Image (cartoon, grey):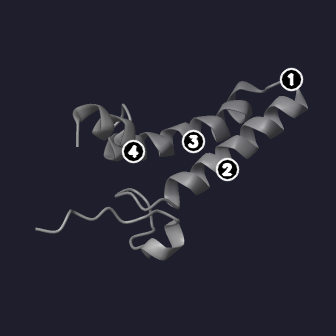
Amino acid sequence: MSALNRFMLRGPIPPQVHGVLDHPLAAVLIAGPLVLNFDDRAATVIALVFGAGAAVLGVGTAWSTGIVRVIPRSCTGMRTLRSPPR
């Protein structure tokens, strides 16, 4: 597999770093409107909803920082890549 293909599958941020950054992002989105006293109620609600969503997604991932440890391949919808026969 070429380096470009590996990069496109993994992305620019390694999964461990991405998983660690999910939690502070959720905390900032949840605490930000409360600490900064947003004037607009809609902005507060949107930030809280996005923060709750980021927290759920950050915790519910199958990465090293999430609580999901094993996901059967049949549930992911992804095909298994097999090496060619020898």
Q: Amino acid at mark 1?
A: Asp
Q: Position of residue 69 (x, y in %)?
A: 39, 70
54 w.r.t. 86: above or below: above
Residue assigned mark 4: 20
**Residue 6 position by quadrant:** top left
Label 1 to label 3, Cα distance in Å? 20 Å
Q: Amino acid at mark 4?
A: Val
Q: Residues within 10 Å of mark 1 (few under 14, many from 20)?
A: few
Q: Amino acid at mark 2?
A: Ala
Label 3 to label 4, Cα distance in Å? 12 Å
Q: Residue at x 50, y 66 (%)?
A: 76
Whichever of callouts 2 and 1 sits on the residue coming sooner in the sequence is: 1
Residue assigned mark 2: 52
Q: Which quadrant is the C terminus positioned in?
A: bottom left
Q: Residues within 10 Å of mark 2 (few under 14, many from 20)?
A: some
Label 2 to label 4, Cα distance in Å? 16 Å
Q: Is residue 57 left or right of residue 36?
A: left
Q: Amino acid at mark 3?
A: Ala
Label 2 to label 1, Cα distance in Å? 20 Å
47 w.r.t. 19: above or below: above
